Amino acid sequence: MSMLPPRTITDVLRKPIRTDEIVTAMARFRWPATSPTNVMVIDDDPVALDPMRATLTAIGIDAVGLLAGRAALRELDRHRLDAIILDLVMPEFDGCAVLDALQ
């Protein structure tokens, strides 16, 4: 399984997410400036997932979006991630289960 950088940064963003909140939360992941920032967004709700991915792309962040926690875990090795944006409330395999699996 891919490892995220050794930093642990936690932000809580409430839905509906505002663009300025995304920009502020993601500003700390822009290292180094010459390398693209890669983020995985995991949310079972396409109404939340699609705008989040579009906003990240608009501010120059490469974003992959997945609708399920288990699918996201299977995809981790395919991506070099700087951050994960994770919905904690999802059916079946929720965000807490994803966090446990990442440990």
Image (cartoon, grey):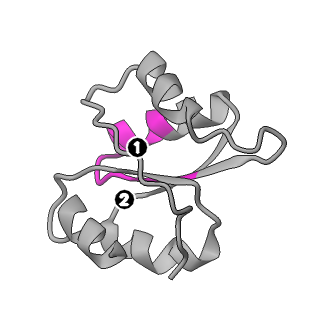
Q: Is residue 23 left or right of residue 44?
A: right
Q: Please identify the residue farthest to the top as the structure is shown.
A: 20
Q: Quadrant of the C terminus?
A: bottom left
Q: Secondary structure at mark 1?
A: helix
Q: Is residue 90 above or below residue 35?
A: below
The quadrant in which residue 44 appears is bottom left
Distance CA(mark 1)–CA(mark 2): 8 Å
Please give the residue where the numbered disc 1 appears in the rendered image: 49
Marker disc for residue 96: none
Residue under the point 55% across and 76% down? 2
- Spot occupied by residue 31 in the image (x, y as percentages of width and height): 70, 43
Q: Is residue 94 visible?
A: no
Q: Is residue 69 left or right of residue 53?
A: left
Residue under the point 39% across and 20% down? 18
- Spot occupied by residue 94 in the image (x, y as percentages of width and height): 19, 63
- Spot occupied by residue 30 in the image (x, y as percentages of width and height): 66, 38
Q: Is residue 103 left or right of residue 59?
A: left
Q: Earlier in the sequence, mark 1 or mark 2?
A: 1
Residue under the point 41% across and 46% down? 9
Q: Secondary structure at mark 2?
A: loop
Please give the residue where the numbered disc 2 appears in the rendered image: 67
Assess whether mark 2 and mark 1 are in contact (beta carbons under 8 angstroms).
Answer: yes
Magenta includes 50?
yes
Q: Is residue 18 visible?
A: yes
Residues drawn in magenta: 39-52
Q: Amino acid at mark 1?
A: Leu
Q: Are there few (<14), some (14-19), or many (20+) residues within 10 Å of tag 2? A: some
Q: Is residue 58 above or below residue 70?
A: above
